[in-house]
Amino acid sequence: MTGGLLFDVCQTIGGMGENGGRYFLSQMLDVLSYMHGKGVVHRDLKLENILVDDNMNLKVADFGFATFRKVHTLKSYRGTMTYMAPEIKEGKTYDGMQIDMFSTGVILFIIVQGIFPFKEAKKDEYFYNLILNNDFETYWKKTGGQNLSPEFKDLIIKMFQYEGKNRPTIDEIRAHPWMQAPFDMKHIRSDILNELSEKRSQQTTDTSREDMNSRGDSMLDLVRETSVLDICKFNDMTDHDIDVVPGVIWDDLNTFNAEHQEGKMSIEKIENKCIKMTLPGEEGNDLVVKVKFFQTGENDPEQPSRTRVRFMRKRGDLDKWYSMFKDMKDAVLEDVLLAPQQAQLEV
């Protein structure tokens, strides 16, 4: 497969709309039909485990969590949190085919909307709780899906059912009115390929222009598209917009470490994810902060495209972190951190 990951396609294009969803779901149903027909369940279906070739034909990969034993009465904890069905999280005995269907629903939602439907399928998670309580009006408003068709909304809610036995089967999805709507596979494939080519060309142009802002590696692989942001509210204290590439922030953090922390802080780049800072503390109480980058403003003609940087404390004393972050801003970041724009979604 020469095309890459479906995750990368979604990250580049963003939401592909309902026709894009039908295009890829029809292929996923063929895969599931073959796989389940052989008595095999995957248990880790996600965009990162789906390959696409140059003609947008998909192939499911990474069968590390797959099994063919007792597929209808499984108990082991498997999968990826954001795609995982609730019965796995709760430690219940589960049907592998039903949890594959739940994960396929998450994949479908991202393809159509360009964002995750929820952070996790847990009863106390805000967005999934809206579904469980049948508060669909609020759910679709918060996820930007007011204009989606009633047929799509009906199908996706059924795929997200809390009880696995209430989720539709492969045949039921194929027979659903949303999948029965006429659509031209060749035409949709052409549209997807054209948009992907245009977005990648624009990214190449932007990369060439933005590289000049960095004193070293631009680290543009750390920047995620806003369209695949987790649905959560931004923190005005530690979220800022920047008009430089992540490589500049990397340089500034290393300068701060050398000049103000005596080199005690460990700073590392996690490929395609973030910058991780660790300041050793007493008795193993280390301060760990991840610095993530998100693209913003590209869909708003009134706003220039910017990058939002988020400083996320993962472990350690909160007061110590805010004190260090203030020193960091005063020492090296004052000229690059801008006021954050409005978050994509607010709870």
Image: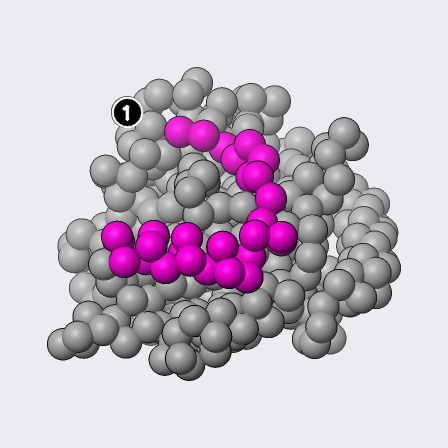
Image point (83%, 55%), residue name: 202
Percent x, y of residue 55: 78, 63
Question: How are the residues colored?
Answer: one colour
Q: Residue furthest top?
A: 137
65 with respect to 227 (left or right):
left
Residue 147 in view (yes/no): yes
Q: Residue furthest bottom?
A: 263
Percent x, y of residue 233: 43, 37
Image point (17%, 75%), residue name: 282
Dot 1, crowdedness within 10 Å: few (<14), some or many (≥20)?
few
Image point (40%, 80%), residue name: 262
Percent x, y of residue 277: 41, 70
- Mark 1 = which residue? 133
4 with respect to 228 (left or right):
right
Residue 16 versus residue 314: which sits nearer the camera? 314
Residue 131 versus residue 314: which sits nearer the camera? 314
Image point (26%, 43%), residue name: 122
The number of callouts visible is: 1
Residue 316 versus residue 149: which sits nearer the camera? 316
Q: Name the secondary structure under disc 1.
A: loop
Percent x, y of residue 305: 73, 44
Quarter holding residue 251: bottom right
Figure quadrant of the C terminus: top left
Residue 335 highlighted magenta (yes or no):
yes
Residue 227 in view (yes/no): no
Residue 25 highlighted magenta (yes or no):
no
Residue 35 versus residue 110: which sits nearer the camera? 110
In the rendered structure, which amino acid carries the disc numbered 1? Asn
Q: Which residues are magenta?
A: 318-347
Figure quadrant of the N terminus: bottom right
